[in-house]
Image: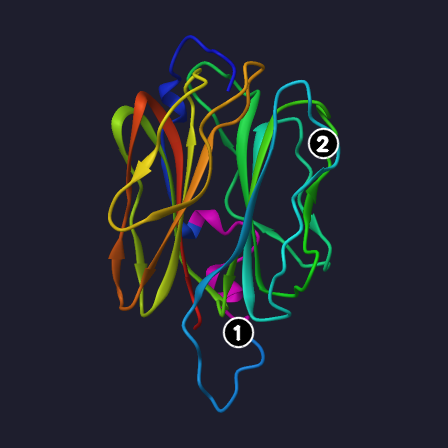
Amino acid sequence: MQDCRQYVAACCRGTTVAALLVAGPIAALAQATPAGIANGAIPSPSLGAHTLLTQSEGLGASPAVTAPLTTQPHGSSLIVFNGGYSSNAAGPRDRYGNRWKQLGNDVPFGNGYGDRFNVKAYVALDAKGGPGHTVSFAKDGNATGEISIPFIEIRHAGVLRDVSQNYAPTGLQLTSGNVTTTGPATLIAVWWGDGGVKRMTAVPNNGFAVIESYLTLPDNSGVQCAVAYKQVAAAGTYNVSWTGAPVQGAILWLLAFQSK
């Protein structure tokens, strides 16, 4: 992101699932269950298709449209993030007309950005899908501005079991909040660095594997981010720490998806 001068400590905070699901309680979201389950057998959730759209500063376009994916016709959950200008506040639309719910409030970047940049997260449970699946955001506030949009499918996932969002202050190792599962789950971790740097690293621990990243930015700037996942086979409480250089703060998300 663009260079900045001062860390805004007021932006550092942690949020639990109760506050994140502002569009409705988690119990309501959990009513959606994967369709097409044969013989009563419920498959475990797993990572599906994924992509990351990035547009650099001054070279963006509206709408911002992700690369097309081939997603499952039914039974998957979808997660998409919009990291960039706060003025680009429109929610997501996708080719299959899914209903998206925002997770919590917009999370503004600290480190001197004021209210110019933020991150917004959206989920669609038990979504419709298929070939050519894209997600788009209209950029009504700043059409050419920088933006990063991770779009991830989690197969056989009817329940968003738990979510944690926190703002980790500047440090070498940045740790997410905890999520708790009641059985097999797919965990999705997302890192949004706030440093005014163009080259960086962000490496997760605890068995998480990076699936998408934008850590080498062009000279005209972009919104750095990284996405990682982990499969867990049993109930438990999990978190992830990201180690990076140069040191910076980051908005962190950790989401736990289950079949039921």
Q: Which residue is tagged 1?
A: 33
Q: Which residue range is magenta in the image?
A: 19-32
Q: Is residue 23 magenta?
A: yes
- The reply to whether residue 152 is in sight is no
Q: Which residue is tagged 2?
A: 139
What is the number of callouts on the image? Answer: 2
Q: Name the amino acid, label 2.
A: Lys
Location of residue 112 by image quarter: top left
- The reply to whether residue 118 is in sight is yes
Q: Residue at x 28, y 44 (%)?
A: 240
Query: Any mark on residue 80, and which?
Result: none
Q: Identify whether 64 is placed above or below 248.
A: below
Query: How far across and down, in percent of the image, does residue 243 sit?
Result: 27, 32
Q: Nearer the viewer, residue 203 or 35?
A: 203
Q: Nearer the viewer, residue 26 or 3?
A: 3
Q: Earlier in the sequence, mark 2 or mark 1?
A: 1
Q: Is residue 164 magenta?
A: no
Q: Identify whether 76 is placed above or below 41.
A: above
The crowd level at tag 1 (other Cα within 10 Å; few <14, some 14-19, many 20+) is many
Q: Identify whether 163 is placed above or below 117.
A: below
The crowd level at tag 2 (other Cα within 10 Å; few <14, some 14-19, many 20+) is many
Q: Name the amino acid, label 1.
A: Thr
